[in-house]
Image (cartoon, helix red, strand yellow):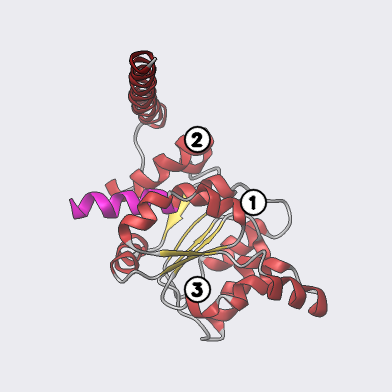
Amino acid sequence: MIENSDNTERAVRAKSRDMSESSLGIEEISMKIIESEIGTHGYSELQWNVVRRVIHATADFDFAKPDKNEIIFSANAIENAFEAFRKKRHIVVDVDMVQSGINKKSVAKIGNSLVCNISNKEVIDISKNENKTRSTVAMRYSSKEIDGGIVVIGNAPTALYEVIKMINENAVIPALVIGIPVGFVSAAESKSELSTTNVEFITNIGRKGGSPAASSIINALMLLYISNLN
């Protein structure tokens, strides 16, 4: 019985290893397909690593097309992200779905902490009492962590508008705002307004965006930072 148990355990480990190697192979092939289909582009090497990761997560090539939903970087967006990682600043997200998509191993390796207050009881109560969206209240509630930190918004334009409002009030100065909310109402407009602020940002043109795109951006930035440490 013990021998059979050992054989079963070895088989499970071997299968797990094969699946892991297979997954790595699939990702590598996917990246080559993306490179082939996009061809030439105007991104720097670091920027392209981020954009390519978004395309890989969404299977949407429009994120790299200037006439579609191109991802846009402010001048020092990536450098500011790296500095925030180095200082172990907070990463504040708008919704649970964005938080779920962020690589927790990378967060732990860098030493940052994730903050998502959308389901916080106080936030819910304030939202009801003041007749505001939870995403709006959650951003204001997280102002201490936002100041000097990284904001990642993939769902709610109202969250992005609130962050912009706090920036314009000089209440917060985030190291970086990743603003890529999705939707037909205010998504494109909020992203356009973000690009006029005096903080570093990563955003995109138009209605497309979403939690997978937002989390893939911060994941790509963390991977780039970790690779530079090694």
Compared with residue 103, is residue 137 higher up or lower down, i.e. above or below?
below
Q: Residues within 10 Å of mark 1 (few under 14, many from 20)?
A: many
Q: For label 3, count other residues whose C-alpha is less than 10 Å away and answer few (under 14), some (14-19) or many (20+).
A: few
Local SS, label 3:
loop
Question: Do the residues bearing badges 1 and 3 touch, measured as CB atoms within 8 Å?
Answer: no
Q: Residue 193: give x, y in percent of width and height.
A: 58, 67
125 lies left or right of 105 = right
Kind of residue indicated by mark 1? Val
Q: Which residue is mark 2?
A: 61
Q: Is residue 181 visible?
A: yes
Q: Is 228 within the magenta?
A: yes
Q: Which residue is mark 1?
A: 182
Residue at 40%, 30% (x, y): give it: 34
Q: Nearer the viewer, mark 1 or mark 2?
A: 1
Look at the magenta stretch and give its main secondary structure: helix
How far is mark 1 from mark 3, CA to CA? 20 Å
Q: CA distance from mark 3 to mark 2?
A: 27 Å
Q: Does any portion of residue 205 appear in the rendered image?
A: no
Element at label 2: helix
> Height in image: 54 above or below 196?
above
The residue segment tinted magenta is 218-230
Question: What is the number of the mark on residue 197?
Answer: 3
Give the x, y percent position of residue 40. Answer: 34, 35
At label 2, the amino acid type is Phe
